[in-house]
């Protein structure tokens, strides 16, 4: 997870600095490490969108909406509904430019600017149109917009060279030099002020700051030590209790078993109020015990409730925990669903989500267990692409032959999959 996010941040930096192709590469790398990194998927979709690849952008956002239930992707998809019409405008505008109908082309290209779709190509052609009309400053505005997004864009760089040859950029040289001089003066002033502050910075102040830093470290260590010793003390107390009471426990257990009464009214009330957690606990506690037929009938009703509405309740709870990255509780509730939901319509989702929770918590062995089950039982399911891709990645460093099997299956069954990237190809070829 951390590695994927770090790579995503690098991708974001590259995008902000105008290296859009490099940003796309980094997004792909980030996604290959963690398919749950919704931000990386969204960013790659946005970059494809800016470059005019609407189909690829929509594919990415659909995947993000499906796998990660990402609301931003859903909004992006909603916004793309009119972009097919803008693509038509763009196509007609290119034809008009070839026919030298520049004014008509400008009207259509401006309509394309109503969204950010195909922004790079649209601005390049707007610059071309304004050049042909002799409006060089307007052309320069659109060239600069392109170079802000894509510093290496060949068309924009070529247009800029032409504008420079027309003398459009010469006026910028004086302000640029002046700006550099002003920046230099400001840096010098900051440096002088910093020196004065440093000279006048008292030793006591320094010691105070250092002491605060040391206290923070000591307190952090102390808190960590408390947690460790707290756990140890609990374990010691447990051991003492169990050790001290050994002779008496055997006698108590016998009397407890004899006196333990089936809580018929409580379980009945929990069933009626649909207190699923309590019903589950009572069902686990009493299902293997020697109880009367009436009590067995009540437990049967409890079990039926758990296998229907209970599965949905536990699934929602588990999903909520997973989204908040509380994987410990997510596993608990997805496991309950898995135990109870064999005949439930949610079962394919349960198997996949349980595997995903283990994957997100770094448990490769259990990820393989549940993803393999999904692949065998629900090979045509909606999560199959993700399952095959993840299994291929997990086996990549463990068992190259098995990784290749999953990679080939992914390419064979889903030739247009978003997961068909350089990582998968490297496993096959």
Image (cartoon, rainbow, N blue to C red):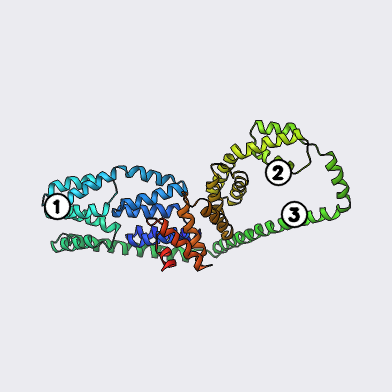
Compared to 343, does 268 lie above or below?
above
Left or right of 305 in this view: 261 = right
SS class, disc 1: helix
Query: Circles 1 and 2: CB distance less than 8 Å?
Result: no
Q: Quadrant of residue 74?
A: top left
Q: CA distance from mark 3 to mark 1?
A: 79 Å
Nearer to me, 381 or 419: 381
Q: Quadrant of residue 414?
A: bottom left
| 3 or 2: tag closer to the N-terminus | 3
Q: CA distance from mark 1 to mark 2?
A: 75 Å
On residue 284, which mark appears? 2
Kindly identify which residue carries mark 3: 234
Nearer to me, 175 or 253: 253
Kindly identify which residue carries mark 1: 97
Nearer to me, 50 or 166: 50
Question: Disc 1 or disc 2, which is closer to the eye?
Answer: 2
Crowd class of label 1 (few under 14; some 14 to 19; many from 20; radius 10 Å): some
Q: Position of residue 182 (x, y in %)?
A: 29, 61
| 1 or 2: tag closer to the N-terminus | 1
């Amino acid at each position: 997870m951390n590695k994927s996010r770090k790579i995503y941040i690098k991708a974001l930096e590259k995008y902000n600095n105008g290296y859009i192709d490099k940003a796309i590469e980094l997004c792909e790398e980030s996604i290959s490490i963690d398919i749950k990194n919704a931000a990386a998927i969204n960013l790659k979709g946005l970059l494809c969108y800016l470059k005019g690849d609407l189909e690829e952008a929509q594919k990415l956002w659909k995947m993000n909406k499906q796998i990660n239930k990402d609301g931003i992707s859903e909004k992006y998809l909603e916004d793309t509904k009119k972009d097919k019409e803008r693509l038509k405008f763009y196509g007609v505008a290119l034809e008009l430019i070839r026919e030298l109908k520049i004014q008509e082309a400008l009207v259509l290209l401006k309509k394309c600017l109503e969204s950010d779709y195909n922004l790079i190509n649209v601005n390049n052609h707007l610059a071309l149109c304004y050049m042909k009309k002799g409006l060089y400053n307007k052309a320069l505005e659109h060239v600069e917009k392109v170079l802000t997004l894509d510093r290496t864009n060949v068309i924009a760089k070529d247009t800029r060279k032409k504008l420079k040859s027309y003398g459009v950029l010469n006026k910028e040289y004086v302000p640029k030099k002046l700006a550099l001089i002003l920046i230099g003066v400001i840096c010098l002033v900051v440096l002088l002020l910093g020196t004065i502050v440093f000279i006048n910075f008292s030793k006591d102040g320094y010691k105070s700051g250092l002491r605060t830093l040391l206290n923070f470290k000591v307190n952090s260590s102390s808190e960590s030590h408390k947690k460790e010793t707290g756990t140890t003390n609990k374990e010691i107390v447990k051991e003492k209790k169990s050790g001290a009471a050994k002779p008496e426990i055997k006698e108590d257990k016998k009397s407890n078993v004899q006196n333990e009464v089936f809580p018929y009214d409580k379980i009945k009330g929990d069933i009626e109020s649909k207190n699923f957690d309590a019903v589950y606990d009572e069902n686990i506690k009493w299902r293997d015990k020697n109880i009367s037929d009436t009590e067995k009938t009540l437990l049967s009703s409890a079990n039926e409730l758990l296998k229907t509405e209970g599965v949905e309740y536990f699934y929602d709870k588990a999903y909520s925990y997973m989204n908040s990255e509380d994987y410990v509780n997510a596993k608990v509730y997805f496991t309950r669903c898995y135990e109870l939901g064999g005949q439930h319509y949610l079962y394919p989702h349960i198997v996949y989500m349980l595997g995903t929770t283990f994957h997100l918590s770094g448990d490769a062995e259990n990820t393989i267990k549940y993803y393999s089950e999904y692949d065998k039982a629900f090979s045509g399911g909606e999560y199959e692409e993700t399952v095959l891709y993840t299994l291929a990645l997990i086996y990549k460093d463990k068992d190259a032959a098995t990784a290749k099997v999953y990679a080939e299956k992914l390419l064979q069954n889903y030739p247009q999959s978003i997961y068909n990237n350089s990582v998968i190809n490297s496993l096959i070829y």
